[in-house]
Structure formats: structure tokens, C-alpha cells
Amino acid sequence: MSMQQPGLLLVVSGPAGSGKGTVNQELLKTGDFDFSVSATTRAPRPGEVDGVHYHFISREDFTERIRRGEMLEYTEYVGNYYGTPLDGVRKSIAAGRNMILEIELEGARHVKEKYPDAVLVILLPVTFKTQEERLRKRGTEPEEKIRARLERTKEEMKYLDVYDYIVYNRDGCAKDAVNDLLAIVRAEKCKTSRHPDAADKYFEKS
Amino acid sequence: MSMQQPGLLLVVSGPAGSGKGTVNQELLKTGDFDFSVSATTRAPRPGEVDGVHYHFISREDFTERIRRGEMLEYTEYVGNYYGTPLDGVRKSIAAGRNMILEIELEGARHVKEKYPDAVLVILLPVTFKTQEERLRKRGTEPEEKIRARLERTKEEMKYLDVYDYIVYNRDGCAKDAVNDLLAIVRAEKCKTSRHPDAADKYFEKS
């Protein structure tokens, strides 16, 4: 029965400092997920590989893809475009694979509109204070960017109810967050609404 | 944060032969659940203990409790009353304990009306054929009762969408069913709707 189910489209959002990168990498290691590689117009950070962390493309290329409807969602953030190419997502879901999208609030909303079956999760440090500390410890960004990110979080927290689930990523407890996400996927697959032909199948004589 | 959450009211239904007794016993063993002991007017089966498997009470006592509003739900089934005393459930939930109710369709519906936060799960053998085989193998009931139970299942499967989740209990895989239920509880506790004050808490300075 589960073999015939389409995969789950799992959106994992989270403010800068939520640790969503680490948590999503752990999910990938389970082998039950494909990662949607986002496209972006921002410059690669040290260590980031094109086609692995992001598809790094030009502004011209990006806007052209939007025009052609080839983006499931996209957003502009701190001067750069970020978006999800549609083809990869479609392929994985249809093949019964679970798909992780690591995107921001605005993108998550668009996905929910286009794919109501998508499951939206926000990963949160337990408190804003923790978030701030994590960002400063990371030390990869100038103060100005950190402030912009924190301001953005303040704004976005007003729209928490866009998300179906909240997962808290406590310091040193990333494993618990991963297990929450795995439980969410497992539970979602049991939802009656995802088994519309369950009664018919129950009485099938096979 | 999770310490302040009320417990989850988990309704586990399932047709005769679904193995819900076994699965629920396994849930109890985790130590994270209290079992609501139902009241019933039927006679104890061999080995059943009053106050453990059921509160075995008289018809007069049962109808009196209904009249006083002391039953969260009740139903009449094959000539006997079955119901859930309200006090035990209230106490456990308020103390943050998860509560399992093992009840039938009609009762599940009543619970959902009175407690919209309740989570309704139906446990199913994978097919009707399996269910029939399990009932006959059990050999504890006359053919007439078995037929009545199977007919009842046919009727009840029309109302599958009363349940939030379907969990399949495959032969020899009760552990998978238990893990599905644990995942459902874990996921439900992450639901944004169960954290109405999450944004406020996020910005609290503690």
C-alpha cells in the first residue's frame, strides 16, 4: 500500500540560526529523502558547490525561468533570488520519494498554494536570544546582515500559522529535531486524507 | 515548553481482529500513556479483571451515569453498554499525560465532538480477508457473533473519514503499528495549532 503512495513534499523553513541545514543533512542520511537543490543568484560561500548546495545561476537566467513557469516558488531575499526548480520536485514525488525543500516563509506559502499536500514545518531555536547568539558565534556575516536577519525573523514570526508544524532545535539536541521531523513524515503518511481509496482496498479480494 | 502542554487524547478504534488490544498494551509499556479503563455492562471474559480491563458495572449504574453526564462517550453494542468515564480522562490530560481510549466508531465520533483536540486513529488489518481469518483463529466466539462483527465492519468502513489517521497492523508487524502510533503522537505535539502562544514565547526574555 505504502509503495503506491506518492512521496511527501516536506518544506523545512527556519530563521537564520535555526540549524535547518544540519537537521536536513541528517534527514538526507536516512536515505528516505531527496533534497531539492534550490537555484539562487547569490554568490557561493566558501565551500559551497554548484549543483550540490545550490544551483548558482545568473539574474537573467533566474527571471527567464520564472517567466517560463519553471519555478515551484521563488523569493527575493537580501538582494538575491532563491527558488525551487519544478522538474526535480515533480520527478521525486511521482516516484514515491520524499522531498525536502529548505525555503523561506514566502516560498513556503507559494508551495502550499500550488501543492496543498505539502507539509510545512518551521524549525526554531527555542528562543530569539538563542538565535541571536548562534548567528554571532557563526561569525560568517557582518553585523549589518545579522541585524537584517533578526529583523526579518521578528516579522516572519507573525505568520507562524502558515506552518503545519513547529520543531524546536535545542542546542545540542539536533537529533531530537530530526526525530520530530521523521515522526511528522511517518504520521502524515498515515493520514486518512492521504488514503482516499482505503475502504475499497480493504475489501479487495486479492 | 513541552512540559506545559496538556496531554494528548488518543482514540484508537479498530474492528474486531485489528489487534488493537495488543498494540495498545505495547503503547502502555512505553510509560508515556495512561489507559482509560472503559465501563461496560457486559459480563467479564475469562481472565478479565474489574478495574483493569473494564469497570464491569450494572445496566442501572451505567444509565444513571449517562444521565448525570459522567460519560465522555458511550455506545450500545451487541446488547451491552460500553463507555468512557469522564473523570479519569480529564485528570490525565490536565496533568500532561497522554491518554488512550480504545473505543468504537460511534464513541470516537462523540469524543471528537466533545474534545476537538482528540486524535482519532483506526487500526486495520490490511484486508477484510485477514480480519475474518484472525477472528476465526481466535476461536473465542460463536459463528453468529463473528458474522455480526464482520457485518459491522462493512458498515463502519463507510465512515473511515471520521478518523484522522489509518494505521495498518500487518500480521507479525505489530511493532510497526506501534511505531506509527508513537509517530502520530510525536507529530501531533509539534502541530502549530497546539502551540498557540509559540510566537510570544519565542521573544520572551527569560
Image: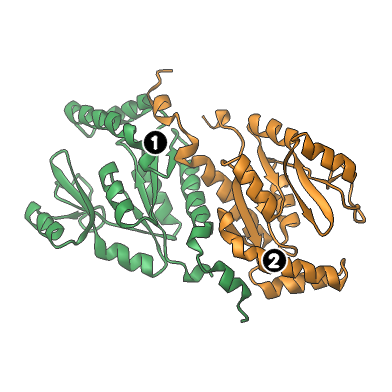
Chain colours: A green, B orange
| Chain bearing mark 1 | A
Q: What is the quadrant of the C terminus of chain B in the image?
A: top left
* Near-viewer residue (B11 or B115): B115
Q: Quadrant of residue A32?
A: bottom left
The residues bearing labels 2 and 1 have C-alpha atoms spaced at a distance of 44 Å
Element on which disc 1 rests: strand
In this rendering, the answer to whether A60 lies above or below B51 is below
| Chain bearing mark 2 | B
In this rendering, the answer to whether B58 lies above or below A91 is above
Residue shown at 18%/61% (left/top)? A69
In this rendering, the answer to whether A23 lies above or below A57 is above
Q: Position of residue A173 (x, y in %)?
A: 47, 37
Label 1: which residue? A124
* Apparent side of residue B61 relative to residue B7 in the rendered image (left or right): right
Within 10 Å of disc 1 (Cα), the crowding (few <14, some 14-19, many 20+) is many
Element on which disc 2 rests: helix
**Amino acid at circle 1:** Leu
Residue shown at 14%/49% (left/top)? A41
Q: Position of residue A111 (x, y in %)?
A: 30, 53
Q: Quadrant of residue B2?
A: top right
Residue shown at 78%/43% (left/top)? B37
Label 2: which residue? B153
Q: Quadrant of residue A203?
A: bottom right
Within 10 Å of disc 2 (Cα), the crowding (few <14, some 14-19, many 20+) is some
Residue placed furthest toward the top: B206
**Amino acid at circle 2:** Thr
* Near-viewer residue (B203 or A137): B203
Count numbered badges in the picture: 2
Check contact, mark 2 vs mark 1: CB within 8 A: no
Residue shown at 58%/68% (left/top)? A199
